[in-house]
Amino acid sequence: MISIKHLYKKFSKNSDDNFHAIQDININIDDGECVVLKGISGSGKSTLLSIIGAIMKPTSGAVEVKGENIVSFSDFHASEYRNKYLGFITQSFHLFDELSVEENISVPLIITKLSNKEMDNKIQHAMDIANISHKAKQKVKTLSGGEKQRCVIARALVNDPQILLCDEPTANLDYDNSIKFMEIICRLKKMNKTLIIATHDPLFDKLKCVDKILHIKEGSLE
Amino acid sequence: MPNSKYINFLFLLLITYRKKHIGIFIISVILIALLSSVLFISSAIRKDIYTTLEDQADFTLQRYKAGKVLNTPESWIDEFLQIDGVSKVTGRIYGMHFYEPSQTYFMIVGVDFFDNGVVKTLQTLLNKIDVEKFLSRDNMIIGSGVKKLFDDYQYKDNYNFRPPDRSIKKVYIYDILPKESNIVSSDMVIMDIDLAREILGVKEGYVTDIVLKVPNPKEREMVREKLTISHFDMRIIEKKDIEKYYKNLFNYKGGVFLILYTISLITFLLILYQRYSMISYIDSKEIAILRCVGWKINSVIWLKIIENFIVAFSAYLTGVIMAYIYVFVFDAPLLKDIFLGYDNLSQDVSFSQQIDPQTLAIVFIVFIIPFITAIIIPVWQKCITEPSEVMR
């Protein structure tokens, strides 16, 4: 379970000019739940996702995951948390373009103590879920946008994380690929993954597997 | 212990982004090759000179009058033999011969082939000689600088010396001194002592200088004092003074190079630091991806250290091998002239091949540690930034 309590994030341009990206957000997300954070650009949904993903520290408040406040984690523990419990799916993919699909997917596993065989099994399993096995040896730079997105999904799944954070996952996809992505999301939901999706794509409004849609405006929940 | 996927990933990054490293690699190779060449040359010269000086007499005495060297009476030899601690005293016939056509000097060395002590000093140079055959007529053994000079003026087989009595003395070229000894022997002409006396015009009963052996180093100071008292018109040159002279000469030349090298290295490292401080989009993206998928700061830094160490170490190996070939196979053209240019004849030297682990360690420490530091500090600064910042 993820429990967000009185979360604030303030960006300071100077001492007099502060921008409140997140203001007093309180959310509870159960294990296996699929939550969509909706809002226009700059509303604070990506900031909230970054804080849940432990790649950004809030100004105040707490984010408890399985009873532990990740906000107080040191960088060492935050990195471990990202590696074991989280998968990131981002709109700009963040892949090594010159490497192959399976090489990209292997990146989170390289620093673990798994054997090569265990790593290969996990990579294959992740590629199967994301429907990208047929492109395993192909360089990422030669893939289409949809295929790159599936590669990102496979990389996010390779460590079998409980939580998946998706930041504008369909922003760079056409309609067909967006639909395919949603099918994968629903499959992941069936696998009891906790999904948090920040988007302003209206396609998610009708998605059956979504449990909650939360609207964010100017850093606060509506 | 990194797994094979880690090593594979590391080499993939190196190969994939090779364009990023190639410029740094080339500059590194040039800097390392330059530094290694300078250190190889200076250590080879030092070794060759010290080996040669090892056989030299402990004291060389020259008679001076009004600041000019005069011939020394042979009678002084017996006088010096009376000093306690002196084991051997020998008179020498040495002198410079002015070679009019090229306006240069070369050194005539008279050798008494029946004096074991003298021959031992030149043994390494003369080990190929059949003494009987050599003395059967007026022969000489010449350094390669003299040989080149004679060739230029068509003296292929012999050369006519002009002693002070205006006669002509034809001396045949018997052999050439080995190239390896050229640091000290390039301008040397070795001949029988009596022939040298005749050509240099040194009268019977005189020598050009006197050399002394004092086996016990503790007695040398006392011997020096006694020599000083014995004759006031005498200059005493100790072996350690000659060693000091050469040491200062080559350390000075090597030092000038090291200063230039240090300036180039610092400039290069500043460029490197600046380059990584304005970390490229590729580097930034790479760090961001790794941090987001859970790589810890130390894992990212280690990856960068190993990646850049491979580049630096490959450059180090390439540079050292290039320097070795340049110095010991091609005899260091250009740099050799700067190091050995004090001589009036051109030097055709072959440096004694040797790998000095200390030299290699100096090059390694002086280059690789600052190299890695210049890269790692900006990478570390990027790593400690919040991953979300790096992602943007």
Image (tube, rainbow, N blue to C red):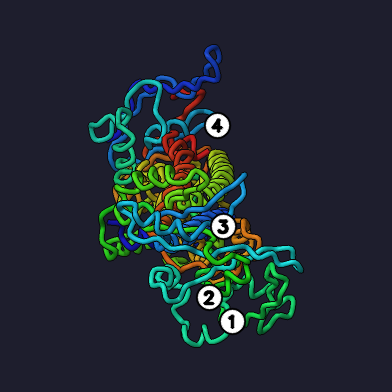
Which numbered disc, 4 or 2, marks the residue closer to the eye? 2
Is the residue B258 above or below the residue A63 in the image?
below
Is the residue B78 above or below the residue B288 in the image?
below
Q: Secondary structure beneath disc 3?
A: loop
What whole-number distance in Å separates the C-alpha atoms at marks 4 and 1?
A: 106 Å
Point out residue B230 in the picture as x, y percentages from the top left corner: 43, 46
- Side (left or right) of B334 relative to A55: right
Q: Label 1: few (<14), some or many (≥20) within 10 Å?
A: some
Q: In which quadrant will I find the C terminus of chain A?
A: top left
Residue annotated with mark 3: B71
Residue annotated with mark 1: B138
Which numbered disc, 3 or 2, marks the residue closer to the eye? 3
The residue drawn where x is 54% and y is 12% is A16
Q: Amino acid at mark 3?
A: Asn
Q: Are marks 4 and 1 in contact (CB under 8 Å)?
A: no
Residue annotated with mark 2: B192
Is the residue B213 above or below the residue A58 in the image?
below
Is the residue A221 above or below the residue A179 in the image?
above
Q: Amino acid at mark 2?
A: Asp
